[in-house]
Structures are given as C-alpha cells and as structure tokens.
Image (tube, helix red, strand yellow):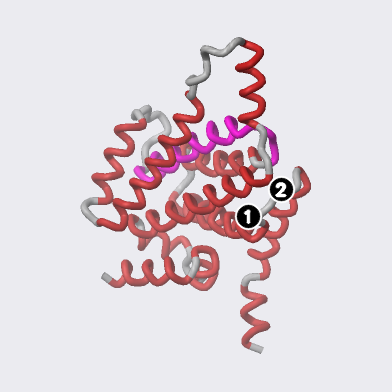
C-alpha cells in the first residue's frame, strides 16, 4: 500500500516528464533517455520556483531559454545550441538577482553581483565558477573565428561539419545540460532555501523527487540554520 501511495503521489509529475521526453523524441532520436528525464525534473523545479517568486521578463526568458536549449538538441546546429545555452545562463543570473524587466546590466557585472550574493561559501563559489566557466566555453564556440583565413568554400564546409550533431556529441551535450541544471538547482537552494521550501508548500516529497535526496537534505539543513 505504501508503494502504491508513493507512486500515485508522483503520477502527475511522471506523466509530465514522459510527455515532454516523448515530445523531444518525436522530433529526433536522442540518446541518454534517463538523463533527458532528469533534465525534465530540473526544468519543472525551475518553473515552479520562478512561478512562485513572481513572473518577470527575465524569469520568463529563463524558462523559454531552457526549453529552447532542449529544442536545439533536436536540430543540427551545435552553434545554435551554444547560442541559446549562453542566453540561458545569462537569464539565470538575472533571475537569481531579481533584476527588473528593464535592467541592462552587463554579463561580467551580473557574475560579480552573484559572487557578492553568495559570499565566501566555498561550495557555492565553486558551483558559480563552474557556471561561469560553461558560459565562457559557449562564448568561445559562438565567436570562434580561428579558421576564418580559409577560403569561403572550405570555411563553410568546415562550419557545416562542426555544427552537425552526432550521437557522441549529443550524448555529451545532454550530459552538459543535465550537469548545469543540477548546479543551478544546488545554487538556488543555497541562496534561497526558504523561498524554495515555500514554493513547494505541502509538496515536500515532490521537491525531493525533482531535485534528488542529497540536494533536498542540504535544503533542510539550510532552512534549519
């Protein structure tokens, strides 16, 4: 009976995850199905958190961007993936700082303010360093012109070959998305533990299911401090 109740408790979430995963797979055959489902969990967490804290341009853009990131996996352009992935990280920073709709703070300043918000906590700082590092990698990919001295024909051919997703690249990129969502979730829990808890008022087990037991235990520890 306990197992049945536990399953029913997550029925709607599991159905949403399965529908989203099936939608992606209907567009393109993708590897790492379990990782895609884990990504879906983090997206649901992020959307719930954003909805609770109040909608804004940047918060809406955050959700739009992560869905665009997932959509880019069903296309052929690795460059397009990095373009929307970079935008997703920027809007995550803006959402974390609760910036108003008309704020035009530059990226370097965004990251500086995030570091101030986090303080000297080593774990949170290492998470933010990782996120900033991933942003830098995407910028390098988007703006790369190291082969621009090629002829137009060779450069275009190389560009097409570079942008084509293959199974190995897709697998790597899916893991990249999963890891950064995990890191972002951990950082959100660190900075706004009470807000996260309140966003899932009377749905603590849903929260545990979405973010994993380890991060959930960190949240409880932060709330009790």
**Residue 71 in the image, given as x and y percentages of width and height:** 65, 40
Q: Residue at x 52, y 38 (%)?
A: 85
Left or right: residue 14 compared with residue 134: right
Label 2: few (<14), some (14–19) or many (≥20) C-alpha neighbours in 10 Å: some
Magenta segment: 74-97
Q: Work out whether residue 195 or residue 185 is closer to the camera in this orientation and state it.
A: 185
Q: Nearer the viewer, residue 147 or 186?
A: 147
The first of marks 2 and 1 along the sequence is 2
Residue 49 as seen in the image, left or right of residue 165: left
Q: Is residue 118 magenta?
A: no
- Labels 2 & 1 near each other (Cβ < 8 A): yes
26 up-or-down from 155: above or below: below
Q: Residues within 10 Å of mark 1 (few under 14, many from 20)?
A: many
Q: Residue at x 43, y 41 (%)?
A: 134
- The local secondary structure at tag 2 comes to helix
The picture places residue 83, in percent across and down from the top left corner, at 53, 31
Return the x and y of residue 122 as percentages of the image width and height: 26, 56
Point out which mark residue 36 bears.
1
Q: Residue at x 24, y 45 (%)?
A: 116
Q: Is residue 51 left or right of residue 121?
A: right
Main SS of the magenta segment? Answer: helix
Residue matched to label 2: 24
Spatial CA distance of label 2 from label 1 is 9 Å
**Quadrant where the C terminus lies?**
bottom left
Q: What residue is shown at x 62% (from left), y 23% (from top)? A: 158
Determine whether the residue tagged by mark 1 lies in a helix, strand or loop: helix
State whether residue 75 is above or below residue 208.
above
Placement of 213 over or under 41, stated as above or below: below
Which of the numbered marks, if any, corresponds to residue 151? none
Q: Residue furthest toward the left?
A: 120
């Amino acid at each position: 009976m306990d197992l049945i109740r536990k399953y029913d408790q997550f029925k709607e979430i599991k159905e949403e995850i399965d529908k989203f995963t099936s939608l992606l797979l209907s567009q393109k055959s993708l590897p790492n199905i379990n990782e895609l489902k884990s990504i879906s969990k983090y997206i649901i967490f992020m959307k719930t958190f954003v909805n609770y804290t109040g909608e804004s341009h940047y918060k809406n853009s955050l959700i739009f961007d992560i869905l665009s990131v997932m959509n880019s996996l069903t296309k052929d352009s690795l460059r397009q993936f990095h373009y929307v992935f970079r935008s997703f990280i920027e809007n995550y920073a803006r959402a974390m700082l609760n910036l108003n709709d008309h704020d035009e703070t530059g990226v370097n300043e965004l990251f500086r303010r995030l570091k101030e918000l986090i303080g000297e906590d080593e774990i949170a700082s290492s998470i933010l360093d990782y996120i900033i590092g991933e942003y830098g990698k995407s910028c390098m990919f988007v703006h790369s012109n190291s082969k621009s001295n090629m002829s137009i024909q060779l450069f275009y051919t190389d560009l097409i070959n570079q942008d084509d997703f293959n199974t190995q690249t897709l697998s790597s990129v899916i893991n990249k998305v999963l890891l950064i969502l995990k890191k972002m979730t951990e950082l959100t829990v660190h900075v706004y533990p009470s807000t996260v808890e309140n966003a899932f008022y009377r749905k603590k087990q849903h929260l545990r299911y979405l973010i994993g037991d380890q991060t959930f235990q960190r949240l409880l520890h932060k709330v009790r401090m």
